[in-house]
Amino acid sequence: MDIDEKRLCSDWLAEFPLLKRHQGGRKLLRVYDPVVFGIELRKIYSKWYRPEFIAMNLLSKWKSFNVNTEILTKKSLQYHIEYDEHAQQYGEAARIMRVCFPILSSEEVTEQMIVDLYRQECERAKAGNPLDIWASLVEILKYYGLAEECA
């Protein structure tokens, strides 16, 4: 199956005009202070892709997207889109992304939105090993002069 990567990304960028395509790939990103966040259109097998919210703290020694959250629906645990159905399905996925991650569409991002993003991710990741997420939250709090909240 031929995938028109440019069209795939341009459709998503039309839904989220504040994001920019990163190096011609499937990451649509925005930088705010020490955090890069956006959407990755992750390829799943050859027939599907999955839109995921991603974020990376640029202050962290871990240079990877340590926030990586899939959107969930009542119909399936992980929302995925078949390439052949992209035109019919991506709009619903974009709507869910806007509801779950309002920071993606917010013209004015605040320090509190960034802090809350990492706090929510720490709560969500408690079952796993959230060390890099906790470390990122501490670095972000210090960056914003909120070091007393680290204690």
Image (cartoon, helix red, strand yellow):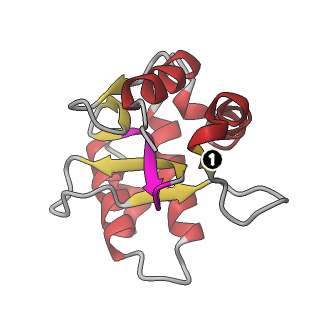
Drawn side of residue 137 relative to residue 89, left or right? left
Q: Secondary structure at mark 1?
A: strand
Q: Residue at x 53, y 57 (%)?
A: 69
Asked if 72 appears above or below 99 in the picture, the reply is below
Asked if 46 appears above or below 132 in the picture, the reply is above
Query: Foreground residue, 124 or 29?
Result: 29
Drawn side of residue 18 relative to residue 35, left or right? right
Residue 150: image quadrant is: bottom left
**Residue beneath label 1, please?**
81
| Highlighted magenta segment, given as a residue range | 37-46
Query: Foreground residue, 52 or 101?
Result: 52
Q: Position of residue 12 (x, y in %)?
A: 52, 26
Residue 35: image quadrant is: top left
Q: Residue at x 62, y 35 (%)?
A: 86
Q: Amino acid at mark 1?
A: Ile
Instruction: Report whether residue 135 is seen.
Output: yes
**Residue 41 drawn in magenta:** yes
Q: Residue at x 76, y 63 (%)?
A: 76
Q: Residues within 10 Å of mark 1 (few under 14, many from 20)?
A: many
Q: Residue furthest front?
A: 1
Q: Position of residue 104 (x, y in %)?
A: 53, 31
